[in-house]
Image (tube, grey):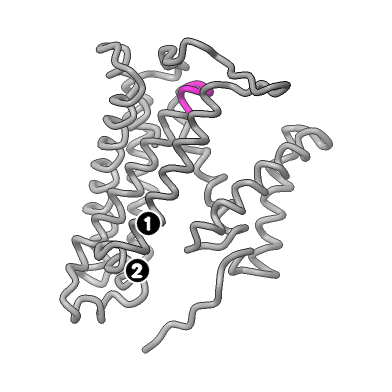
């Protein structure tokens, strides 16, 4: 997410292009970066039956490497995207909303709808669901397991690139921007891992809870309570709000 966001930033500074091509470039960059992660870390499990510990260690190492590349590339400084919108706010009657917030909300909603339609209505989407449920049986049915996994990584990287651009537009760019992904993981745990609807519900709830905690206990203690809430969900309802129990078949 961070690396693709910086790629989009430097392309926008050098070319002066509008938001749409910058988003597309960042999404493409994010997809390619994710494919590198699949090739370096995840493929060792799918092809050689390597222990998941290897994937965990490789992923952490690769993430640290990416962060180190960004730090060396841009230094510890903060960067701001060029202004893409003529008006900073949009007024709806008595309501005032930031233009970037509105565009980010619409883009996120469109991306989620397209993702759901892709997973539920297309052959590649059915292949993704099949591989996630039973990789070996999907391979016996003629599905290209490695290619399907690569597709999943590319899509996730492209969505990370989309997120990185809008985070950079709304806030600032810095090498540790990827730490915000932890909140996405917490939202998935609360909403239900493996459920897109659950991820949305968890994200909205997490945003509301975090806002209330910052107001009542301060920004310094808010992350502590959020992690405690996540631990409670893992203990009481590990499948999350919208998740379901899935029995793995032999």
- Distance from Cα at disc 1 to Cα at disc 2: 13 Å
Q: Residues within 10 Å of mark 1 (few under 14, many from 20)?
A: few
Q: Name the one closer to the observer, 136 or 124.
A: 124
Residue 62 locus on image (x, y percent): 33, 45
Residue 53 locus on image (x, y percent): 38, 64
Question: Can you say whether 74 is above or below 27 in the image?
Answer: above
Residue 214 locus on image (x, y percent): 76, 34
**Quadrant including the N terminus:** top left
Question: Total label count?
Answer: 2
Quadrant of res 70: top left
Residue at 47% from the left image edge and 31% from the top image edge: 176
Left or right of 100 in this view: 204 = right
Q: Is residue 7 visible?
A: no
Q: Name the one closer to the observer, 211 or 76.
A: 211
Left or right of 151 in this view: 178 = right
- The residue identified by callout 1 is 117
- The residue identified by callout 2 is 129
Q: Name the one closer to the observer, 240 or 175.
A: 240
User: Which badge, 1 or 2, is on the more N-terminal residue?
Assistant: 1
**Quadrant including the C terminus:** bottom left
The local secondary structure at tag 2 comes to helix
Q: Residue furthest right?
A: 216
The magenta segment is 167-172
Residue at 52% from the left image edge and 35% from the top image edge: 105
Residue at 59% from the left image edge and 19% from the top image edge: 90
Residue 168 highlighted magenta (yes or no): yes
Residue 245 highlighted magenta (yes or no): no
Q: Main secondary structure of the magenta part?
A: helix
Left or right of 141 in this view: 89 = right
Q: Residue furthest bottom?
A: 250
Q: Residues within 10 Å of mark 2 (few under 14, many from 20)?
A: some
């Amino acid at each position: 997410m961070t690396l693709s966001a910086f790629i989009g930033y430097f392309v926008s500074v050098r070319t002066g292009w509008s938001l749409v091509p910058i988003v597309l470039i960042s999404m493409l960059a994010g997809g390619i970066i994710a494919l590198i992660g699949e090739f370096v870390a995840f493929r060792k499990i799918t092809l050689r039956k390597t222990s998941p510990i290897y994937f965990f260690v490789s992923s952490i190492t690769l993430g640290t490497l990416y962060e180190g590349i960004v730090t060396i590339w841009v230094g510890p400084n903060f960067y701001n995207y060029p202004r893409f919108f003529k008006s900073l706010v949009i007024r709806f009657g008595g309501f005032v909303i930031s233009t970037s917030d509105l565009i980010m909300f619409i883009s996120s909603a469109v991306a989620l709808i397209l993702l759901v339609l892709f997973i539920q209505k297309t052959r590649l989407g059915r292949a993704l669901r099949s591989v996630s449920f039973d990789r070996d049986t999907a391979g016996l049915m003629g599905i290209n397991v490695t290619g399907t996994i690569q597709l999943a990584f590319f899509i996730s990287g492209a969505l990370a690139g989309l997120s990185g651009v809008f985070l950079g537009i709304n806030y600032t760019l810095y090498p540790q921007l990827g730490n915000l992904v932890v909140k996405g993981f917490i939202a998935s745990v609360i909403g239900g891992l493996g459920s897109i609807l659950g991820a949305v519900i968890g994200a909205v709830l997490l945003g509301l809870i975090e806002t209330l905690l910052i107001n009542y206990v301060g920004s310094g203690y808010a992350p502590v309570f959020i992690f405690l809430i996540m631990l409670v969900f893992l203990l009481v309802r590990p499948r999350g709000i919208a998740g379901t129990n899935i029995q793995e078949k032999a």
